[in-house]
Amino acid sequence: IKGAENLIHKALTLLEQDNHPERSSAFEILAEIYLKKALQEFAQRKIPQAQSLHMQAIHYLKQALDVAKLYFPENSPHMIRIKSSIQAIKVEGQTLYPNII
């Protein structure tokens, strides 16, 4: 997972130099990586670390949404997918960490 995270951060750096719309996809992938890391920490009963990683996943999805808003209409599949992902991760977080997320 760490290798994938590093590659996506490098790709994001390049995409940000040109304000490329694919930045949104890079943020979505980072959110997936951080969610997987959160679930791994949760499985090891490292709840504070899992919560932090879960919140970081939500943060990356919100960044993806901010970028997508610049390039896509509100009802586009991109916007709908990202919003749906944010909601799903929040619901999952409320289940895993009641009263936190």
Image (cartoon, helix red, strand yellow):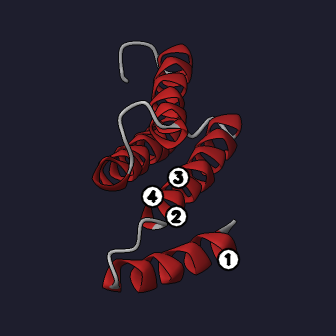
Q: Are marks 4 and 3 in contact (CB under 8 Å)?
A: yes
Image spot of residue 29 (x, y percent): 58, 57
Q: Quadrant of the C terminus?
A: top left
Cα–Cα span, label 3 and label 2: 5 Å
How many other residues sit within 10 Å of disc 3, few (<14), some (14-19) or many (≥20)?
Answer: many
Residue picked out by circle 2: 26
Q: Residue drawn 60% across and 79% down? A: 7
The residue beneath circle 1 is: 3
In this rendered view, identify the residue nearer to me: 58 or 42.
Answer: 58
Left or right placement of residue 54 versus residue 74 in this view? right
Q: Quick check: marks 1 and 3 in contact, CB under 8 Å?
A: no
Tag 3 near tag 2, CB within 8 Å: yes
For image coordinates 34% across by 83% down, the residue present is 18
Q: Mark 4 near mark 2, Cβ–Cβ under 8 Å? A: yes
Residue occupied by mark 4 = 24
In this view, 82 is above or below 22: above
**Disc 3 marks which amino acid?**
Glu
Q: State the residue position of label 3.
A: 28
Tell me which residue sits at (48%, 47%) in the image: 53
| Placement of 81 over or under 1, stated as above or below | above
The kind of residue on which mark 1 rests is Gly
Q: Is residue 16 left or right of residue 87?
A: left
Q: Is residue 87 positioned above or below 21 on the image?
A: above
Query: Amino acid type of disc 2?
Result: Ala
| Few, some or many residues within 10 Å of mark 2 (<14, 14–19, 20+) | many
Instruction: Find the distance from the CA under tag 1 to the CA under tag 3.
Output: 16 Å
Q: Quadrant of the N terminus?
A: bottom right
Percent of width and height locating residue 31: 52, 50
